[in-house]
Image: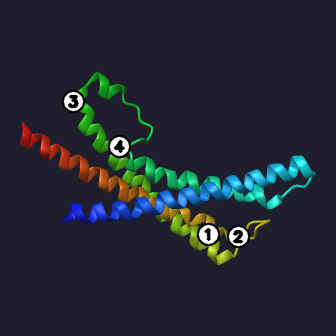
Amino acid sequence: MFGRILDVLDKVLTVFEEWFLYLLVIVGLVSLFVGVVLRYEFSYTLAWSEELIRDVIIYTTFLGCSLAIKKKSMITIDALVQLVPRLKTPLTWVSNISVLLFSVIIFYYGIILSIQKYETFQKSIILEVPFVVLYLILPIMGFLMFTRTVQNIYKDYEETKRQKRAA
């Protein structure tokens, strides 16, 4: 039952993450291309283009963390695991618990920062995008990272169970 819920959640989140990242990158590339062409061919600078690119980079970086966890491609130091293979499971648990703790902290403080930005009505200089829109990526990323880590823990648990049955 829990596995089925995680599978459905995985499919929904994957569609959201991949399409949102795809659209953000396309918007960023088009904006950057137009800005470069206008600057070098027509000596006209789009100020909003650079601000948009900055925001796109922020969003894609934070959303990419979730996909990196899903695909188990986070940067790790595995020298100790290679020297002492028996430590793989305990170190994986330490890593997963660390990511869970980090995601809870990011979620909590992201909500606090988003509320502060909402209450102060701060906006970006050129595009006048409310900062709350930019800061909302923090709790979203915290939620996504937490969910993806729980999914990985469950998959690792199921794999360990399967290996014990086979042995």
Disc 3/disc 1 C-alpha distance (Å): 45 Å
Residue pointed to by mark 2: 129
Q: Residues within 10 Å of mark 1 (few under 14, many from 20)?
A: few
Question: What's the mark number on residue 133?
Answer: 1
Q: Amino acid at mark 3?
A: Arg
Q: Residue 119: horizontal and vertical position, in percent?
A: 64, 77
User: Which amino acid lies under the numbered mark 1 shown in the image of this protein?
Assistant: Val
| Image x and y of residue 68, in percent | 44, 47
Coordinates of residue 155 in the picture (x, y in percent): 25, 50
Asked whether disc 1 touches disc 2, contact meaning CB atoms under 8 Å apart, the reply is: yes
> Which of the 4 image quarters holds residue 11?
bottom left
Q: Amino acid at mark 4?
A: Ser
Identify the disc placed on residue 95. Answer: 4
In front: label 4 or label 1? 1
Work out whether residue 63 or residue 22 is closer to the camera in this orientation and state it.
22
Q: CA distance from mark 2 to mark 3?
A: 51 Å
Taking the view exactly as shown, the residue that stands out farthest to the right is 43
